[in-house]
Amino acid sequence: MGGYCEQHAKARPRPPDQRESAAKRGYDRKWRRIRAQFLRHNPVCEDCGAPSTEAHHRVARAQGGGDHWDNLMALCHTCHSARTVRGE
């Protein structure tokens, strides 16, 4: 179980290669359409001003955040990666 008791084994973070597929996590054709439209309207990274390439959820989908635009922020790949690592 990798050091976790049965109670907490399901809640442990999984490495990227063991996560469910993007489609199973809800990143399907509908999401790709929302993302593309959002990035067209928000072409600049909110953190550094570079061209945006990622639509970041302010409140993660796993915590109940939705795909509405007021829950998204436009970020470049570097800033998105940094926020993801920090758990934002």
Image: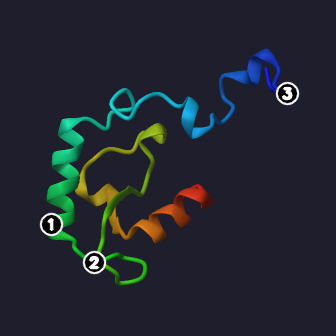
Q: Residue furthest top?
A: 6
Q: Going from the N terminus, do you reach mark 3 or mark 2 first? A: 3
According to the image, what is the colour scheme of the structure?
rainbow
Quadrant position of residue 74: bottom left
Residue in the picture at 36% in, 76% down: 46
Q: Quadrant of residue 14?
A: top right
Q: Is residue 33 left or right of residue 4?
A: left
Q: Is residue 10 left or right of residue 20?
A: right
Give the amino acid at mark 3. Answer: Gly
Label 1 crowd bin: few (<14), some (14–19), many (20+), radius 10 Å = few
7 horizontally vs 68: left or right: right
Tell me if label 3 and label 1 are in contact, CB under 8 Å.
no
- Dot 3 or dot 1: first in sequence order is 3
Q: Residue 44: which disc?
A: 2
Gap in Å between the C-alphas at discs 3 and 1?
45 Å
Element marked by disc 2: loop
The tag on residue 40 is 1
Question: Residue at coordinates 56% horizontally, 34% vertically from top-left?
Answer: 17
Q: Which residue is drawn at 33% across and 31% down?
A: 23
Locate the C terminus by quadrant. bottom right
Q: Quadrant of the N terminus?
A: top right
Q: Name the residue under label 3.
A: 3
Q: Farthest residue to the bottom: give it.
A: 49
Taking the spot 66% from the left edge, 28% from the top edge, the residue there is 11
Mark 3: secondary structure: loop
Q: How far apart are marks 1 and 2 (CA)?
A: 10 Å
Name the residue type under label 2.
Answer: Val
Q: Residue 49, relative to residue 12: is it above or below?
A: below
Residue 81 percent coordinates (x, y) = 51, 62
Give coordinates of residue 53: x percent, y percent.
31, 65
